[in-house]
Image: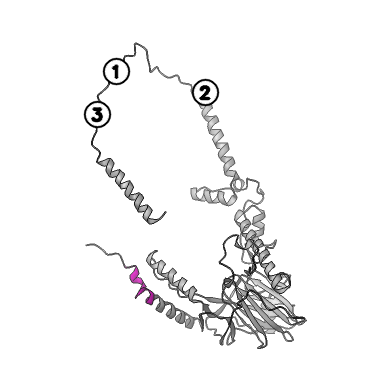
Amino acid sequence: MSEDQRQKDFAERLKRIHGQQNEPEQAPEPAKPERSSGGFDYNPPKESHVVRNSFIWLAFLGLIGVGGYVAWSALPRDMIEAVAGLAGIEVDAQQATEAGEDPAADIFLQETETMSIQGPIFASPNVVQAGSAPVLLSDIATGIELTDDSTQIGQILPFARNARCDLRQPLAGETVSNVRIENALLSAPLQAFSDDQLIDRLVENVEAVTQDGQDLPADGHMIGLKDSIDVFVTDTSAPHYLVLQNMGPGVIWNVQTAPGTTVAHVAIIGSNYSGVIVQSQDTTVEGLLVGDFVEPYRFGDDSSARSCMIRPWRNPQPDWIGVKNAQLGDTVADNDMFAYSKGYEAYNRWYTGALGIDASTNLVTARDAAHVLVGPVPTAPLQYQSLEGQDVRLMETDHMLTGNAATLDNLSKNLHDSLLQAAVGGDVRLLNPATLERN
């Protein structure tokens, strides 16, 4: 309902109340003479049927109780818990697992440090590889230096994103290798964002101050932060065509190769501005930004066939907690897994058409990861290549900032605050002045 309609309704109520208050008082009606009953008692004492009435009320309340219990039990588990939580009722497993759910599954599985609703998590020093148990980073590399607040990369080498929804075709003799994640778990000293993203953040911050009465967020200027992930390539059987895909924030893919290994081409498919570090200047790089071709996701959007459905969904697997909970009757998990499975089907159709192979070919995947291995565990550990001093090939956008943590903070804050002050004509706090006190 609009604010104008609320005001109209409120005004109408005021008119009605005002009319009622100003109506002239009505003179009381004259008392009517009592009618003679002719000796007949119209109000005889009522008979008391305590036993009969008790049975009737017990039967009535029993029917209500049975009907209510059946209706309550028919609700989905998550709805039962939500309603009970609002009412302050603790629902036990027996009540919550009626309606056809498995009685053994009285509590749905919870996420752990290594497994989420949407699949496995491989935090450092674990390294994820295809079809095998994870190995440790120390088995893959030596001289390890992960990024921290003091890390500084070399130059940013921007490249133009693909204007068409396609990728270079693999050449004869090249091996296509897939890495598909949602989130990278290492930090990266880099920010990249568009003017549109900056404007969206400015609007959010102004609304937080003017509409919600909050202080300007201390980290409100920190947008477009990148994460990084190590990609170790050890397979020397053929030149590699790497397809690096993620659905979360932008990623810097740190590709590190074993002696005798060639990475001929890298194709990045990302939901935000991403980049790659490669060891050879001969490696060609291209990138598809999901937002250039696909609208922001809403439930069911990716279920239908589209000519350019490049959102890189992952195919649900039996060990995902979401899959297991869906089998136990969790409707929220069931909806989540439906979105993943249908999204993957749509993505695979596009991927197969673009590259001529299935999206599951030579795939290394996890929801979140810090290190990925493409190929066998090396017989001797590689020399680790950190982000320090390395040039990054990055999808070109309006703002690309780099430096250590303190430098990045100052650069982005100055940019954000100068535009914000210009937009509001001064200090943003003046948009929400303190309440005046009366004497």
Of tags 2 and 3, the one toward the viewer is 3
Instruction: Find disc 2 in the rendering and name its residue.
Output: 52
Whichever of labels 2 and 1 marks the residue nearer the N terminus, that label is 1
Whichever of labels 1 and 3 marks the residue nearer the N terminus, that label is 3
Looking at this view, is 142 or 81 the one in front? 81
Give the residues in magenta. Answer: 421-433
Residues at marks 2 and 1 touching, judged by CB atoms closer than 8 Å: no
Whether residue 364 is visible here, answered yes or no, is: yes
Q: Name the residue type under label 3.
A: Pro
Residue at x-position 53% and y-position 33%:
61
**8 relative to 181 in the view: left or right:** left
Quadrant for the C terminus in the image:
bottom left
Instruction: Find disc 3 in the rendering and name its residue.
Output: 28
Q: Residue furthest top?
A: 39
Q: Position of residue 410 (x, y in %)?
A: 45, 81
**Image quadrant where residue 374 sits:** bottom right
Q: Position of residue 192 (x, y in %)?
A: 53, 78
Q: Position of residue 364 (x, y in %)?
A: 69, 72
- Label 3: few (<14), some or many (≥20) within 10 Å? few
- Label 1: few (<14), some or many (≥20) within 10 Å? few
Instruction: Find disc 1 in the rendering and name its residue.
Output: 34
Q: Is residue 431 magenta?
A: yes
Q: Is residue 17 magenta?
A: no
Using the image, determine if residue 199 lies above or below residue 265.
Answer: above
Q: Name the residue type under label 2.
A: Arg
**Image quadrant where residue 243 sits:** bottom right
Residues at marks 2 and 3 touching, judged by CB atoms closer than 8 Å: no
